[in-house]
Amino acid sequence: AIESRAVLPRISICSPRHNMSTVERTNARDGNLNTLVMPAVDTVEERFPNKPNYLDQDTESSDDASSGNSSADEDEQSWISWFCSLKGNEFFSEVDEEYIQDDFNLSGLSSMVPYYDYALDLILDVESPNDDMLTEQQHELVESAAEMLYGLIHARYTLTSRGMVAMLEKYKQCHFGRCPRVYCNNHPCLPVGTSDVFRTATVKIFCPRCEEIFFPRSKYQGNIDGAYFGTTFPHLFLMTYGYLKPQKSSSMYVPKIFGFKIRDQNRSMNDQGGNHEDVFEDKMHDRK
């Protein structure tokens, strides 16, 4: 009875490193070893001969995405590019790092900007060894100081030849807005400050046609300090590129009622007052 009882087959699969996989079956009754040999399937194409094409496309797209992410990590955005791309900072141009690295161009700014060294390192993407010592509040102060420092540097940079070229491209694309005056026909404007002193007034836009200044339409742009562009830039810009200066608009709005011009009452009162004074002076002269 013991000899007639069958023993369960034992299956052993070889490691994938072998070229062939074997199935061993042992018969306990006669002790013979029967070996079945099957060809191994090592590649995906042999295992799935009818694999759809979209699987390959997904694999390729995932590989491309991973390579794209790696390239994006390599090409990190600089602080200057990030700052100029923020909403409301369309008026700013990207200052060359070579200009910022020249200490002569930054003369006098160290006494005006707090955390000057930290702010300069942040603008130039330089890792400072003492950054870990700053508190979270101090980091916020450094970021605010970097914005202030970049704005003051920007005011100087726009007066250079490279700065003029950078602002010229923005002017051609109307990044500074258009004149709201009707008779200027949406003429492009230039940014201007009413003062060169920091925290005195916000930036305005100057129209070369009517030669008037206006508030920017965007509330974000209206909060920018006017010292970041200065009082000189738009006028020096139009002198440098004289062909861009338009003819001054002579059209003026004339108030009318039922088609008739309104008489200037202030002017008429001044004229009448002047006549009365002349008459009074003549009478006094006759009495003498």
Image (spheres, helix red, strand yellow):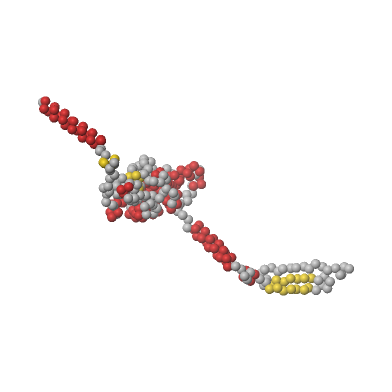
x, y percentage for residue 184?
Answer: 31, 49
Residue 37 in sight in this render: yes
Rendered view: 58 above or below 228: below
**Residue most toward the top?**
287
Nearer to the camera, 34 or 269: 269
Residue 99 in sight in this render: no
User: At x 28% / y 55%, what residue is drawn?
Assistant: 243
Please state if 105 lies on the left or on the right of 4 as rendered: left
Nearer to the camera, 133 or 246: 246
x, y percentage for residue 153?
Answer: 37, 48
Give the position of the N terminus as an image quadrant: bottom right
x, y percentage for residue 231?
Answer: 32, 45
User: At x 47% / y 49%, what residue is drawn?
Assistant: 128
User: At x 57% / y 66%, what residue is drawn?
Assistant: 54
Please state if 154 lies on the left or on the right of 247 as rendered: right
x, y percentage for residue 18?
Answer: 68, 71
Give the position of the C terminus as an image quadrant: top left
